[in-house]
Image: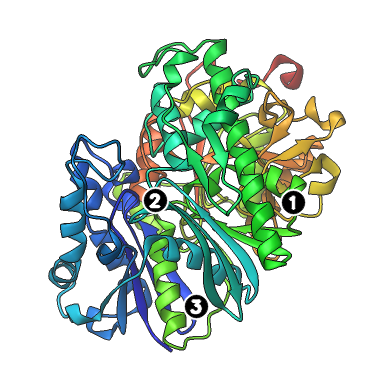
Amino acid sequence: MPTVLGINAVFHDPAAALVAGGRIVAAAEEERFSRRKHGKSAVPFATWELPEAAMRFCLRHGGLAPADLDAVAYSYDPALAEAPRSIHDDDITADAWEPLRTLYARRAPSFLATALPGLDPQRVVFVAHHVAHAASAYLAAGWEDCAVLVCDGRGERASMLAGHVRGGTLEVLATQPLPHSLGFLYSALTEHLGFRRDSDEYKVMAMASYGRPAYLAELRELVRADGCGGFAVAPIDLGRWAPALRSGDEWRPEHADLACSVQTRLEEVLLELVGLLHERTGERDLAMAGGVALNCVANTRLLEEGPFDRIWVQPAAGDAGTALGAALWVARDRGGRLAPMGTADLGPGWTDGELLGWLHAAGIEPERPPDVAEATAEILAADGIVAWFQGRSEFGPRALGHRSLLANPAYERNLERLNDVKGREQFRPVAPMVTLERAPDIFTRGPLPSPYMLFTHGVREEWRTRIPAVVHVDGSARAQTVDRREEPLMAAVIDAFERRTGVPVLVNTSLNTAGRPMVDDPRDALECLGSAPVDALVIGPYVVRRPVAVGTQDRRPAEVAA
């Protein structure tokens, strides 16, 4: 069975993944080690950095040396990159950095051999960007036959791939050449609304729920499916509908209307694309990846109104996931039989002894309760906020119960509290976490199970007032279901919380503060405890409580304290 290390180091989200023995052994984004979110800095080409720390982690976790690798799969093929045109042309690839990007990719084998002493540079294999995205979806899903759709900002020279997988082999049916790009349209809107492009697109999705599609008719003329599996995006002056915002500016109703209009048009075009894809393939299953596939509102509409019975989305659907996809693609190409991706917790983890060593090094003597689940539930039932650090970290942008902030969903003000902890805009929602068997009692629509937080769910009317902190303005929630066979500790916390409160739901949001990547190691967790107003850190079997100032011992709402 081939042993393959996958690498993404092209546009953003540098990452590494290891496939060995027919299974996914490890995967991690470089930002978790470098602490630069999305691998970005003020210098554009810094986003092309090799994920050296992530690579070292993957090899260390797999017990491998660079010389042991059969291949290193790089998720960009410079041979496919279009030669840049004049910088005065209206073309996405015609920018000052494009020649450097391609040159960097061509020299990646020598860069990798330097970063990984002992690696033969001849073992570096280039995998087309969108093929890597596609492989990260259908090979990780474990589907031998399915349709596949990749939609993002761009690859080498395209922004979309539609394909048909038969017997595990991908046939590309359609691509969308640049400069037309749904991902770039959404990123341009993100920047127009004062957020960071290729980073904050989820904020636009949240804002869209506050608006109405006031500009949809005009957008339908400017953004159109072509009936052949692709689409066209005309140049759009977003300022004609709402003035551009700078970071920190207050948004107005017309900004929410613009977000809603673009979100709605995105969903409509995607529905047309998957409709044609279903006609051409006849498949009942659809696998998706690419940054656009992280749009959980669009994913839900595709499932509800589209022709496919099942949709599987790669949890690391953004560019980080191409590291995994490239590794899977090369491993499969070389005859490997691959196991499906059964979990997203593929990053670093620590033993109980190692965690205690970190705590002692920080001068902390933690509690070790006889039942950490019961102790955590007690804090949450008293309306405390818990920084939760357990097991291996998750691969991808979602906190799934290993690096999370947990809270009581019964109090609406906890949304504001958590957004304050994280330094986030108050219009952004937080997510509910629920055991798989209780989810149908609370949610009316959306796929179940939903372990990766990639779809939205309707909240039943009778539950909206019971868990207001996790209900978005449109009555939806991006729920995560917990299978107790796979996550017994988290299920035990939810059970213990329900026994105390009658509510089988917890608030789950990522363990990080504004502008910082998700917490990955114990040092980051201790820093978060020291800098953010959380009540306790539960790290492995240990509980570290924040000292309570005199006169503030009971911060629960009056009706609960009574």
Which mark's residue is nearer the viewer, 1 or 2?
1
Q: Which residue is mark 2?
A: 520
The three-letter code of the residue at mark 2 reads Asp
User: Which mark is drawn over residue 306?
Assistant: none
Q: Is residue 399 visible?
A: no
**Considering the numbered disc 3 on the image, is that residue within a helix, a strand or a loop?**
strand
From what the image shows, is residue 63 above or below residue 45? below
Q: In terms of depth relative to the viewer, which is nearer, 255 or 38?
A: 255
Verify CB contact (< 8 Å) between mark 1 and mark 2. Answer: no
Q: CA distance from mark 2 to mark 3?
A: 23 Å
The mark that comes first in sequence, 1 or 3, is 3
Residue depth check, mark 2 versus mark 3: number of the one nearer the observer: 3
Q: Is residue 146 visible?
A: yes
Give the residue type at disc 1. Pro
Apparent side of residue 427 relative to residue 79 in the rendered image (left or right): right
Residue 502 image position (x, y, % from top left) = 82, 37
Under circle 1, the secondary element is loop
Q: Is residue 73 above or below residue 361?
A: below
Image quadrant containing the N terminus: bottom left
Residue at the spot of label 1: 447
Label placed on residue 23: 3
Q: CA distance from mark 1 to mark 2?
A: 29 Å
Relative to residue 280, is residue 474 depicted above or below? Answer: above
The picture quadrant where one finds residue 282 is bottom right
